[in-house]
C-alpha cells in the first residue's frame, strides 16, 4: 500500500490514536531502557532482537526443551528463513515470539525485544495488544486455521476492529482493499464468502490479508505454502515478498523447504533440537555451509543443476526426542563426521562460533575441515 | 436458504405420512397377520365385558371388515373432516382433527390429548431452559479448568445426574422440599393463564429434577466439545489476532462446540414433548406422559395410536427445526 493510501492517514481519530500510542510506546521503551541499564545489558539495536530464548514444556514424561537457547536479530525489510526438520522447534519459536505460550504451563525465559520492548517480561495485555497489530502470523493450513463458521470478511475485519478505533464500514472497506492487494478478484463480493467456498490458494491469500490488516512490522509465516500445489506456492511466495517490500516489514519464514528460503530469505537460521546449528546470510549458507546437518538438508534437496543420482541423500536416523536430547552435540548420533572430534561430540555441546563474517556454526569441526568436507561433498555431487 | 427450508418441509410431510402408515399398520394390519379376527379386534376397542352387539357395532363402525387401504383412507379422512361414531346409546361426533374415538372413555381422543399438552409443554420448555443454561456453562467452565477440583467435582455430579433415574431424584426432592420442609407444597399443575406464580412455583421441583438429568449429559457433551474445539487451529489464529481470551472462548470456541449440541437438543426436546413419562408420573402431573401410561394400562387402542402420532409429530417437527437451525449455524451445510 502506497503511503498516501494508508487508511490510517487523513483519518483524524486514527491519527490521534496513533500519536497517543506512540507516546505510550515511548514511555514503555524508556522504562525498558532503564531496566536494561540496571541489568548491564547491551541496548537492542535491531527491530527484533532475541537473546537466549528458552521455551520448555513440563510433561508427565519429563521436560520438553522445545527451544533451548536461541539468539538472533532481524531488521525491518529483511527476511529470515528458519529451517529444520519437524520437531526442531521452528513453530514453537514463532508462537513464542507472538506470546502464545506466556500463559499455561510453558516455561519461557530469555529476551524477545521488539522495538526495544521485552515481550517475555511484558504484561500479558500489552503483548496481546501487539499481537495482530505490530506482529502477525500466517499459518500453514488455511482450511483449519480459518474459522469455518465466519465469513472471510468477518475474520479479516476482526483484528482490525479491535486494534483500531474504526467503524464497521471503514473496517469492511479496509478488508476489501486488503483482498484486492493480495490478488483476490471481485474482492467486495467474496468478502461475504465462507472459507470453504475459497480455493486453497485463495484461502491462503485471504489469510495473508488477515495478517496484514494492521500493517504489522513483523510478519511470521509458518510454512505458508505446504498445503498448496507448486504453481500456487510460487505465487504465494512472490506475494509475500512483494508485500514485504511494500510494507517494509521484517519477515520470518519458517519452513522445511530449502527451496522456499533460497528464493526469499536474506538470512538463514538452521535449527536442530531447539538450538541453532547454523546462521548466516543466504549466500553463505548455500555456497559454503559449515554444519553437517545443513549439508544433510542441502543433500536431501533435489537439484536440477546436478547430475542425477540414483537417490537423494537423506539424513540417517530421526530427529531426537526433545526430552532426552543426546549429550554433547545434539546431532552427533546422526552425524557422519562426529568420530573426527576425539569424542568431544559426545561430551561437549559445541558453541556457536563465527566461521566467516556474520556466519555462525555450532560444530566441533574446525573451519578448515568444514570447508574441506563441503568442497568434497559438492564435488562428488556434481 | 429458502429452497433448503422448502425441501426440508416437503420431506417432513412425507415423513409424517409414512409414520401414519406405520402406526396404522401396527394397529390394524399386524393383528390380522397374527390371525386375529376382525371381531376379536373390535372387542379391543370396546369397554370390558362388551355385549355382542356393541362389538359388532364397533367392528362396523371402524370398518374392520373392509380392505386395509379403505380403512387407512377412512383413518386419514377422519383427521381432516371428522367422523361420526355410534357409541352405544347416542351418536358421537368426533370433530377434525379426529385421531380416533375412545370407546372406553366415550370421548374423542384429540381433545383429551390437547388438554394435556400445556402440562407437558410447560414441563419440557422450563426444564430445557434450565438444563441448557446449567449444562453448557458447567461444561465450558470444566473444559477451561480441565483437571481442576471444579472440573472433577462437576463431572462427578454429572455422572451421578446421568445415572440417577428421575423417580429417585424426584421422590427425594418431593420428600425433602415438599413434605419435610414444605417450600414447594402441593405440587399440582396450575395453568399459567390462571395463576402464573403458582404455575411456576409448582413446577420448580419437576423442572429441577428433569433438568438435572439432562444438564449432566449436556455438561459432559459441552466439555468434550469445548476441549476439542479449543485445540483447533482456528483458535490459535484467533489468539494470534490479539483477541481477548473471552472473545476467543465464546465467539470462536463455544460457537463451534455448540453445533452438535443443537442437534441433540432438538431430539431431546422433541422426545420430551411427546410425554415426559417418568417425570409426570413421579410428580403426578397430568400431561401426555401420564395420558400415555393410562392409555396403555386401559389398552385403549385409539388413545395409544393418537399419542404415538402426536409424539412422532413432535419429534419430526423438532428435527425439522434442528435442520434449519443447523443450516443457520453451520454455513457449510447451506451450500
Image (spheres, coloured by chain):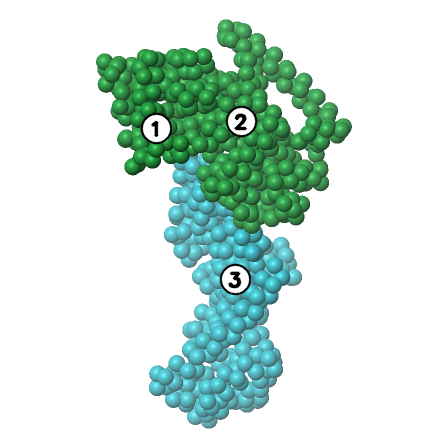
Chain colours: A green, B cyan
**Badge number at residue B319:** 3
Compute the Cα span from label 3 to label 1.
68 Å
Which quadrant of the figure contains the C terminus of chain B?
Answer: bottom right
- B43 or B146: nearer the eye? B146
**Badge number at residue A251:** 2
- B35 or B206: nearer the eye? B35
Please report the residue visible at 50 percent of the width from the left and 39 percent of the height from the top.
A233
Q: Is residue A138 above or below residue B298?
A: above
- A165 or A224: nearer the eye? A224
Count neighbours of disc 2 (C-alpha within 10 A) and say few if under 14, some if 14 to 19, many if 20 or more: many
Please report the residue visible at 60 percent of the width from the left and 38 percent of the height from the top.
A182
Please report the residue visible at 69 percent of the width from the left and 24 percent of the height from the top.
A18
Q: Chain of mark 3?
A: B
Q: Is residue B255 left or right of residue A278?
A: right
Residue A123 in sight from this viewpoint:
no
Residue A333 in sight from this viewpoint:
yes
Check disc 1 and report the residue beneath it: A382
Which quadrant of the figure contains the N terminus of chain B?
Answer: bottom right
Kind of element beneath mark 3: helix
Amino acid at each position: 500500500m502506497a503511503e498516501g493510501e494508508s487508511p490510517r492517514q487523513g483519518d483524524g481519530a486514527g491519527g490521534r490514536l496513533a500519536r497517543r500510542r506512540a507516546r505510550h510506546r515511548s514511555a514503555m521503551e524508556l522504562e525498558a531502557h532503564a531496566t536494561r541499564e540496571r541489568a548491564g545489558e547491551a541496548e537492542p539495536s535491531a527491530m527484533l532482537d532475541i537473546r537466549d530464548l528458552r521455551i520448555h514444556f513440563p510433561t508427565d514424561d519429563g521436560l520438553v526443551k522445545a527451544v533451548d537457547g536461541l539468539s538472533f536479530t532481524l531488521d525491518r525489510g529483511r527476511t529470515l528463513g528458519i529451517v529444520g526438520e519437524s520437531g526442531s522447534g521452528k513453530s514453537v519459536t514463532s508462537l513464542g515470539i507472538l506470546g502464545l505460550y506466556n500463559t499455561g504451563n510453558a516455561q519461557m525465559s530469555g529476551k524477545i525485544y521488539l522495538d526495544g520492548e521485552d515481550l517475555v517480561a511484558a504484561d500479558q495485555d500489552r503483548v496481546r495488544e501487539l499481537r495482530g497489530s505490530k506482529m502477525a502470523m500466517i499459518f500453514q493450513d488455511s482450511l483449519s486455521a480459518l474459522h469455518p463458521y465466519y465469513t472471510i470478511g468477518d475474520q479479516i475485519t476482526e483484528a482490525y476492529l479491535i486494534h483500531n478505533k474504526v467503524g464497521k464500514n471503514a473496517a469492511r472497506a479496509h478488508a476489501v482493499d486488503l483482498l484486492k492487494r493480495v490478488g483476490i478478484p471481485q474482492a467486495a463480493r467474496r468478502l461475504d464468502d465462507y472459507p470453504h467456498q475459497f480455493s486453497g490458494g485463495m484461502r491462503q491469500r485471504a489469510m495473508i490479508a488477515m495478517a496484514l490488516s494492521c500493517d504489522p512490522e513483523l510478519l511470521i509465516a509458518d510454512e505458508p505454502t505446504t498445503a498448496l500445489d507448486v504453481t500456487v506456492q510460487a505465487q504465494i511466495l512472490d506475494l509475500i515478498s512483494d508485500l514485504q517490500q511494500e510494507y517494509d516489514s521484517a519477515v520470518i519464514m519458517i519452513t522445511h523447504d530449502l527451496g522456499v528460503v533460497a528464493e526469499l530469505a536474506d538470512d538463514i537460521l538452521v535449527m536442530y533440537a531447539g538450538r541453532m546449528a547454523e546462521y548466516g546470510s543466504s549466500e553463505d549458507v548455500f555456497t559454503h555451509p559449515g554444519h553437517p546437518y545443513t549439508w544433510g538438508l542441502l543433500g536431501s534437496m533435489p537439484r536440477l543443476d546436478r547430475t542425477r543420482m540414483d537417490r537423494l541423500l537423506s539424513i540417517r536416523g530421526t530427529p531426537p526426542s526433545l526430552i532426552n536430547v543426546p549429550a554433547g552435540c545434539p546431532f552427533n548420533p546422526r552425524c557422519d563426521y562426529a568420530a573426527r572430534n576425539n569424542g568431544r561430540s559426545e561430551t561437549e555441546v559445541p558453541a556457536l562460533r563465527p566461521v566467516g563474517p556474520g556466519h555462525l556454526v555450532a560444530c566441533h569441526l574446525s573451519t578448515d575441515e568444514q570447508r574441506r568436507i563441503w568442497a568434497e561433498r559438492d564435488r562428488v555431487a556434481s | 436458504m429458502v429452497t433448503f427450508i422448502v425441501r426440508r418441509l416437503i420431506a417432513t410431510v412425507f415423513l409424517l405420512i409414512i409414520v401414519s402408515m406405520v402406526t396404522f399398520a401396527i394397529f390394524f394390519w399386524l393383528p390380522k397377520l397374527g390371525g386375529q379376527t376382525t371381531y376379536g379386534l373390535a372387542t379391543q376397542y370396546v369397554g370390558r365385558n362388551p355385549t355382542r352387539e356393541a362389538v359388532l357395532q364397533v367392528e362396523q363402525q371402524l370398518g374392520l371388515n373392509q380392505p386395509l387401504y379403505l380403512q387407512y383412507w377412512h383413518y386419514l379422512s377422519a383427521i381432516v373432516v371428522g367422523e361420526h361414531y355410534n357409541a352405544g346409546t347416542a351418536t358421537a361426533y368426533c370433530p377434525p382433527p379426529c385421531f380416533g374415538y375412545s370407546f372406553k372413555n366415550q370421548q374423542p381422543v384429540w381433545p383429551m390429548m390437547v388438554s394435556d399438552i400445556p402440562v407437558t409443554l410447560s414441563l419440557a420448555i422450563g426444564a430445557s431452559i434450565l438444563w441448557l443454561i446449567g449444562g453448557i456453562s458447567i461444561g465450558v467452565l470444566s473444559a477451561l479448568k480441565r483437571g481442576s477440583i471444579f472440573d472433577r467435582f462437576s463431572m462427578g455430579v454429572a455422572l451421578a445426574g446421568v445415572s440417577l433415574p428421575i423417580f429417585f431424584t424426584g421422590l427425594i426432592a418431593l420428600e425433602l422440599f415438599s413434605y419435610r420442609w414444605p417450600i414447594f407444597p402441593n405440587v399440582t399443575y396450575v395453568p399459567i393463564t390462571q395463576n402464573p406464580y403458582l404455575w411456576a412455583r409448582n413446577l420448580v421441583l419437576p423442572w429441577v429434577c428433569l433438568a438435572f438429568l439432562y444438564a449432566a449429559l449436556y455438561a459432559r457433551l459441552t466439555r468434550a466439545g469445548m476441549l476439542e474445539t479449543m485445540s483447533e487451529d482456528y483458535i490459535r489464529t484467533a489468539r494470534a489476532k490479539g483477541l481477548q481470551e473471552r472473545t476467543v472462548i465464546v465467539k470462536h470456541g463455544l460457537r463451534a462446540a455448540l453445533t452438535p449440541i443443537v442437534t441433540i437438543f432438538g431430539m431431546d426436546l422433541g422426545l420430551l414433548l411427546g410425554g415426559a413419562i417418568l417425570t409426570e408420573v413421579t410428580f403426578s402431573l397430568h400431561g401426555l406422559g401420564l395420558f400415555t401410561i393410562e392409555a396403555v394400562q386401559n389398552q385403549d387402542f385409539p388413545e395409544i395410536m393418537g399419542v404415538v402420532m402426536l409424539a412422532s409429530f413432535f419429534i419430526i417437527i423438532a428435527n425439522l427445526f434442528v435442520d434449519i437451525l443447523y443450516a443457520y449455524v453451520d454455513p457449510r451445510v447451506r451450500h
